[in-house]
């Protein structure tokens, strides 16, 4: 056999047993369609995976960190200035069998100079109010479980009856002791 039997050096079609397949012949189209089908299948698979992943990540299912929509939003607590000049007040309760010692602080808006001036100007009225308020309460009304109610009531009275421009935002008790006589 010669060396030139299987080589197509001249570019001519040498008729062999297989008929000499050309590159653009009938076997090329099925191979091309097969690769296109594989590519489309892979593309469909990738799109399906992406869609499922995005649906899971976007939260269409219930999130584990969801908040109750009926509850109030509690953000950062505001800072208030504190008025401390009332001092400690000692008085008897309304039932005359107990004494109360109270050191009350008033919180108002920070940087509100008008409120600070008004509270300072009314310090004697505030001391008198505090003494009268606690002298008008029975000892069972001054128990620790009623403290929030007392603070709310004091805040409302001060804002509506005693203060003009200043607004009390919160009442604090440094000391609230009820002692039996």
Image: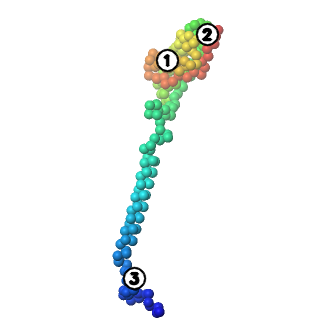
Q: Nearer the viewer, residue 105 or 97?
A: 97
Q: Residue at x 44, y 43 (%)?
A: 61
Q: Quadrant of residue 24?
A: bottom left
Q: Residue furthest bottom?
A: 2
Q: Residue at x 37, y 74 (%)?
A: 28
Q: Which mark is residue 153?
A: 1
Q: Residue at x 47, y 16 (%)?
A: 157
Res 107 seen here: yes
Distance (Cα) linking label 3 and label 2: 119 Å
Name the front one of labels 3 and 1: 3
Res 121 seen here: no
Q: Which mark is residue 39?
A: none
Q: Nearer the viewer, residue 113 or 51?
A: 51
Label 1 packing within 10 angstroms: few (<14), some (14-19), many (20+): few
Q: Nearer the viewer, residue 49 or 111?
A: 49
Q: Earlier in the sequence, mark 3 or mark 1?
A: 3
């Amino acid at each position: 056999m010669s060396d030139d039997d299987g080589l197509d050096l001249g570019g001519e079609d040498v008729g062999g047993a297989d008929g000499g397949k050309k590159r653009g012949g009938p076997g090329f189209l099925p191979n091309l369609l097969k690769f296109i089908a594989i590519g489309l299948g892979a593309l469909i698979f990738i799109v399906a995976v992406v869609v499922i992943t995005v649906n899971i990540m976007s939260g269409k299912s219930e999130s584990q960190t969801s908040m109750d929509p009926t509850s109030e939003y509690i953000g950062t607590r505001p800072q208030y200035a504190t008025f401390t000049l009332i001092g400690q007040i000692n008085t008897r309760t309304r039932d005359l069998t107990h004494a109360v010692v109270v050191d009350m602080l008033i919180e108002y808006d920070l940087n509100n100079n008008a409120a600070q001036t008004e509270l300072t100007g009314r310090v004697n009225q505030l001391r008198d109010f505090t003494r009268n308020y606690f002298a008008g309460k029975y000892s069972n009304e001054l128990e620790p479980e009623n403290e929030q109610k007392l603070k709310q009531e004091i805040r409302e009275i001060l804002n509506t009856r005693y203060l003009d421009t200043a607004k009390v935002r919160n009442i604090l008790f440094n000391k609230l002791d009820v002692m039996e006589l």
